[in-house]
Amino acid sequence: MSELTNHTRDSLSGRTNSAVIFLHGYGADANDLLGLADPLSEHMPDTMFFAPDAPERCIGNPMGYQWFPIPWIDGSSEEEARAGMLRAVDELNDYLDTIMVDYGFEPDQIALLGFSQGTMMALHVAPRREEAMSCVVGFSGRILEPEMLEDEMQVKMPVLLIHGDEDQVVPPQSLPEAGQALQAAGFETYAHIMRGTGHGISPDGLGVALAFLRKNLGYEEA
């Protein structure tokens, strides 16, 4: 049983045919992304939305949570950061398994949407699971251990990478680096640059993500 705190938004229609799971960034919490359910659900009425809090209180922001430490922000060691990441991977896998059992979803009915450190988790976990999820949307993140992807991946799914061209937290170059690793491993990979956007989600970026989610979760294309 997963120990991650779970937050949900029910489907707008009352019918539930799919799920989007939000993975928040470093120092934030589940509510940071769960609010996106409001604009998305209008166009995805049969989708339920989930958001866990990351497993650790954030060293750099005790009011929020982290998936793992970040050495250049919180002074942790590279060893501590990697150990934290591996623990978080196990926690997130347990959480995903629990959601599927408790709510009756098949893997291909679930999409992961991450932001920043949440994107790093999504891009690391989804390819290494036994069954493919419907898709992954990654905002403003990067891929962890890209050199390990081809050897460790178990499944493939479409991936959409979105990044602001004025991001001063996670460099915009992280998008093509992740894209190259994913494409080299055979993933169907898409990208969108949010012009004039820093470390955040712009309306055009959310619109591109919505179209991608609708396509991969079985809605008619807009």
Image (cartoon, rainbow, N blue to C red):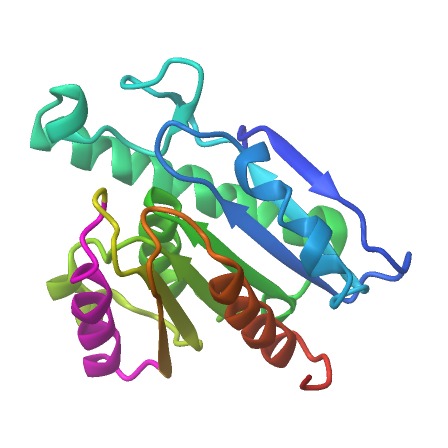
x, y percent for residue 38: 72, 50
What's the residue at 33%, 43% (across, down)? 117
Of 153 and 163, nearer the camera is: 163
Q: Is residue 26 above or below residue 198?
A: above
**Residue at the extreme front:** 196
Residue 134 visible in the picture: no
Which of these two is toward me, 92 or 193? 193
Q: Main secondary structure of the magenta part?
A: helix
Q: Quadrant of the C terminus?
A: bottom right
Which residue is at 65% across, 75% downward? Answer: 214
The quarter of the image holding the N terminus is: top right
User: Residue pushed farthest right?
Assistant: 14
User: Is 179 included in the stretch rendered in magenta?
Assistant: yes
Q: Which residue in the rendered view is the most extreme toward the top?
A: 62
For the point 23% across and 42% down, the residue is 169
Residue 127, image x and y in percent?
A: 36, 66
**Camera-nearest residue between 80 and 215:** 215
Quadrant of the image occupied by residue 172: bottom left
- Any magenta on residue 160? no
Relative to residue 143, is residue 91 depicted above or below? Answer: above
Q: Is residue 121 above or below residue 70?
A: below
At x 54%, y 28%, the residue is 3
In this picture, residue 104 sits left or right of residue 24: right
**Does residue 58 show up?**
yes
Q: Position of residue 192 (x, y in %)?
A: 37, 72
Q: Quadrant of residue 57?
A: top left
Magenta-highlighted residues: 170-187
